[in-house]
């Protein structure tokens, strides 16, 4: 069983989903639910469901949400190494992270607000206390919710042979990864995040067709070896720099299988975890993307950030057998 060490955010998700088409600046009828989430937590749980031995270093407070998150990690058999952070009394009071978001009646994200200041506690000095476990892992996965200084510290580990995989999280945070692109084994970004990291305009915002290959070529020029660029309803794109003389990219685009979308939250995290799981089992680049996309479609049919239906789902060279 391969070992993975995940460093990232965990939080309580508060989801408000409209029952009917949304009316702006009005009160809409719908359903409000809570569930444990966070990019780091979602990836850790998904990797566990795909058969990895997972250690997860995160920051939670000694409060109701923090205890709920810890209980859920234990239930999902994720080896949490998260202490309860309490702050320093009157000067600094910490609370567990919260992500509050609104979905339309089709399950698409309309708006989200995150309150995750506690992740600043994941400093290089704190994370460095787990140096031996980090170096012993087959993969170290992290995401851009953690401080840039900690990301730079993790980048140093790659020089010792550790395989690093990172998730951009958002356009506002992805620039934290710009200094470690050449150290990464794998990067996952949505199209807007990839454009921002590549230093390119997001043409899709102007109604023009997305061009993930051009973005991938620019990222490869910045030292990135391998990446996934998610494209929303258009599926996902992956690429890998070829080792032969002269370089070049091997790349594939996969459209999502047709499925009902109940909640898209967490689907990108599951795709990332599924891709890494498949790649670690020797599947091709294309086969790994197909499995990751299929796993994300399964996840989209659940209200959970990481669906229980993923448990036991095995990467296979014949993706059609999963359908």
Image: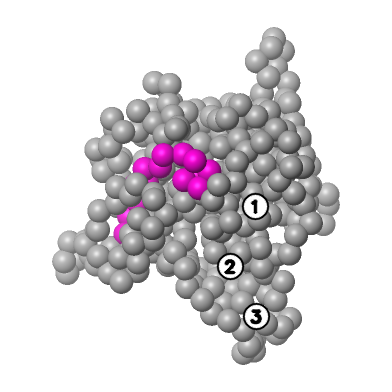
Give yes or no for contact between labels 2 and 3 (Cβ–Cβ under 8 Å): no
**Residue 167 visible in rendering:** no
Q: Which residue is mark 3?
A: 18
Per the model, the C-alpha gap separating discs 1 and 2 is 13 Å
Q: Nearer the viewer, mark 3 or mark 1?
A: 1
- Relative height, residue 67 to residue 232 (above, below): below
- Can you give x and y, in whole percent of width and height, for residue 158 in the image? 43, 26
- Can you give x and y, in whole percent of width and height, for residue 288 in the image? 66, 36
Q: Which residue lies at the image location 34% right of the left edge and 47% below the top edge? A: 79
Q: Which residue lies at the image location 57% right of the left edge and 37% below the top edge? A: 276
Q: Earlier in the sequence, mark 1 or mark 2?
A: 1
Q: Which residue lies at the image location 61% right of the left edge and 26% below the top edge? A: 282
Q: Which residue is mark 2?
A: 303
Q: Is residue 111 left or right of 231 when viewed as pictured?
A: left
Q: Nearer the viewer, residue 88 or 73?
A: 73
Q: Which residues are magenta?
A: 47-60
Q: Earlier in the sequence, mark 3 or mark 1?
A: 3
How packed is label 2: few (under 14 Cα within 10 Å), some, or many (20 or more)?
some
How packed is label 1: few (under 14 Cα within 10 Å), some, or many (20 or more)?
many
- Can you give x and y, in whole percent of width and height, for residue 147 in the image? 38, 47
């Amino acid at each position: 069983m391969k070992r993975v060490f995940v460093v990232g955010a965990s939080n309580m998700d508060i989801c408000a989903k409209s029952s009917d088409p949304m009316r702006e600046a009005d009160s809409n009828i719908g359903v409000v639910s809570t569930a444990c989430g966070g990019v780091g937590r979602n990836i850790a749980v998904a990797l566990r469901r795909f058969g990895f031995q997972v250690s997860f270093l995160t920051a939670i407070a000694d409060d109701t949400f923090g205890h709920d998150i810890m209980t859920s990690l234990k239930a999902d058999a994720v080896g949490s190494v998260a202490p309860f952070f309490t702050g320093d009394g009157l000067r600094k009071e910490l609370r567990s992270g919260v992500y509050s978001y609104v979905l339309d009646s089709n399950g698409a994200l309309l708006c989200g607000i995150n309150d995750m200041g506690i992740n600043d506690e994941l400093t290089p000095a704190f994370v460095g206390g787990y140096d031996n476990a980090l170096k012993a892992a087959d993969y170290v996965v992290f995401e851009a919710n953690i401080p840039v200084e900690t990301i730079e510290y993790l980048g140093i580990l790659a020089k010792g042979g550790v395989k690093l995989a990172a998730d951009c999280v958002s356009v506002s945070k992805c620039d934290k990864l710009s200094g470690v692109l050449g150290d990464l084994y794998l990067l996952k970004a949505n199209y807007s995040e990839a454009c921002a990291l590549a230093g390119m305009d997001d043409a899709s915002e102007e109604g023009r067709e997305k061009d993930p290959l051009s973005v991938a070529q620019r990222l490869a020029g910045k030292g990135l070896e391998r990446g996934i660029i998610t494209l929303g309803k258009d599926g996902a794109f992956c690429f890998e720099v070829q080792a032969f003389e002269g370089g070049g990219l091997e790349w594939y685009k996969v459209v999502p299988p047709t499925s009902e979308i109940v909640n898209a939250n967490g689907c990108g995290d599951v795709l990332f975890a599924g891709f890494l799981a498949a790649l670690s089992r020797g599947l091709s680049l294309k086969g790994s993307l197909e499995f990751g996309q299929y796993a994300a479609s399964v996840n989209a049919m659940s209200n959970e950030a990481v669906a229980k239906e993923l448990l036991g789902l095995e990467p296979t060279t014949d993706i059609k057998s999963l359908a």
